Amino acid sequence: MSSKPISIIICCFIYLFNLSTLAQKNETKEFPKLSDTIPSEGIYNSNPIGEYNDAYYQLERLNDNIGLPPKEFNFTTPQATLEHFIISCREGKFEDAAYALNLNLFPKSVTRKEAAILAEKFYFVINQRIAIDWEGISDRLDGQVDITTSTNKNISGKPRRSVVFGEVALENRDAVLRLQRVKLKEWGAFWIISANTVENIEPLYAIYGPRKLDRVMPGWSKVGVLGIPIWKIIGTILLGFLGYLLGQFFSFFTRKLFLKSKKPLLKSIATKMAKPAGIVIGVLFFYLTLTYLISFSGSMASTLYAILLIIVIASIAWFLMSFIDYIFAYVTENRVGDSSLEENKHARMMMTYISVARRVLTIIIIIVAITVIFSQFRSLEKLGISLLASAGLITIILGVAAQNTLGNIIAGIQIALTQPASIGDTINIQSEWGYVEDIRFTYMVVRTWDSRRLIIPLKDVISKPFENWSMTNPKQVRPITIYADYHIDVQKVREKFAQLLIDSEDWDEEHEPTVQVTGVTEKSIEIRALCSAKDASTTWDLHCKLREQLVQFVASLNNGGYLAKQRLQIEKDEINKIDNY
């Protein structure tokens, strides 16, 4: 890696630092300060809510400091009040927008100017983090949402006095943004942004207020494309490029540093983990600096931040999965023996444990990552709640659809615990014999003797019988069957077989040479010889070789006179007929 990209990174960091410092020294008046607009000290009045009513909140007082909303402002419905607030803020009329705020939880000393600043802060937060569902906000006086049946008749219900129009994370809780219907003494009922929501504006603005570069950029740089200032687009691209260079530099530096080490573990990390770590560092740098320096607003802001958060969580999950794969691969290569050897039972057992554990941990990481993503978005949480509401039907559908998959995953865990088959074992399953090559999430890969691959569902491995030739001892005994004439001297065959077995290098010498007459047919006798070797593959080769040699020996006796033959008895009359013919 040349020094030029490093120089670019350093220069960009210096430039961004200077901009941040300048922003701290000379904050522009375009955005309100991050410090509290409303003083924390002052005389706070008691809760003004009066007697209970289903249709509205009865108030004894409302905004004594700035007065009641002028008559020309339409606050009769939730949608009208929220539209007034948004449109007034969009036009820069923050004092008009402040009339939509319930300031009852603040001191009476709050001025109209301070209330306007509060409205401006709240508008910024809404623009940053809230995607308002206007269709879900009623435009009726009673706050109900019209529901029409197939007969085109509206369904009547109870009037609402509180409507939620957004939710946003605030420290360790969620701040719910509400509109409330209130009634003040002899005045009619109208809608206003709730006092509890207004009370949360300051802490929300402290978290989601304008970033460093937002405050320092001059007015001419606010010219934008599709509503986005051009400097934000350029700044985002620049930060992305810096994140890429930082990731590449981190990978390069880690690889150079660890490759100099004499420890195999560090060298292995340098070659296999430097790149994933660099990618995670670059993504985290981009996300953190973008969040700290640049703020996006409008309808695309919540989508952008959601996508960025998903990318960050996904990259961290991918790094953890890569790290787990690396750890298990390192243990397999350096701490586990040769599992290809039939007699190495411990190595095969460890390979099975590692294979299943790696996949189980991968599933856990994926589930945790998805859970974290779901927990960050209220819309997804609502989706989850509505799914739980119909849990009966969903459970049945998922149970039927995922029955085989879940069954195979559970079967994989059973195989790891009970060890009916391990990686490297020689098995005979579904009339095929081969070697267990891998155990995946839902299936087992068996490499047959002719290098084909059998894919066996793990449920079949658990529920159906099969032969494991390596389970307790890889050594194997195989029968050799030949057929010969009744007149053959079996003792000669027995002696010849013993000599052939002794001369063979593959014989394990654990089973004595055995030759027996195991059957008789109308044509021949059945002679069975038993041979043994260290493993199934060697035994098969020995079995084939000895069978060939025994057949050759029987054929050489009495010029083939002891080979199996079919006998026919011909009567004298039949002979005469043949002679006359």
Image (cartoon, rainbow, N blue to C red):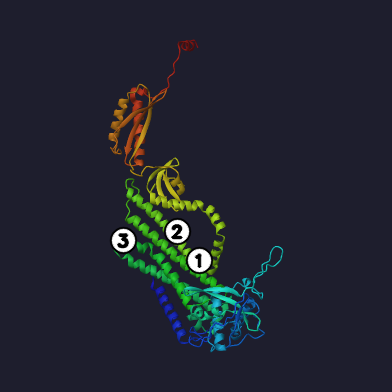
Residue 144: quadrant of the picture: bottom right
Q: Nearer the viewer, mark 1 or mark 3?
A: 1
Q: Nearer the viewer, residue 114 or 326?
A: 114
Under mark 1, the amino acid is: Phe
**Disc 3 to disc 2: CB gap under 8 Å:** no
Classify 10 Å Cα crowding around label 2: few (below 14), some (14-19), many (20 and above).
some
Q: Residue at x 34, y 61 (%)?
A: 268
Image: 351 above or below 581: below
Q: Which residue is mark 3?
A: 264
Gap in Å between the C-alphas at discs 3 and 2? Answer: 29 Å
- Residue 359 is situated, as x and y percent measured from the top left of the image, at 42, 56
Tell me the kind of residue under disc 3.
Answer: Pro
Asked if 100 appears above or below 493 in the picture, the reply is below
Which element carries disc 3, helix, strand or loop? Answer: helix
Q: Which residue is rendered at x = 43% and y = 81% of the image?
A: 17
**CA gap, disc 1 and disc 3:** 40 Å
Question: What kind of element bears circle 1?
Answer: helix
Earlier-in-chain disc, 1 versus 2: 2
291 and 256: which is toward the camera: 291
Q: What is the x, y in percent for residue 61?
A: 59, 85
| Disc number for residue 363 | 2
| Mark 2 residue type | Ile
Task: Give the label on residue 374, or none.
Answer: 1
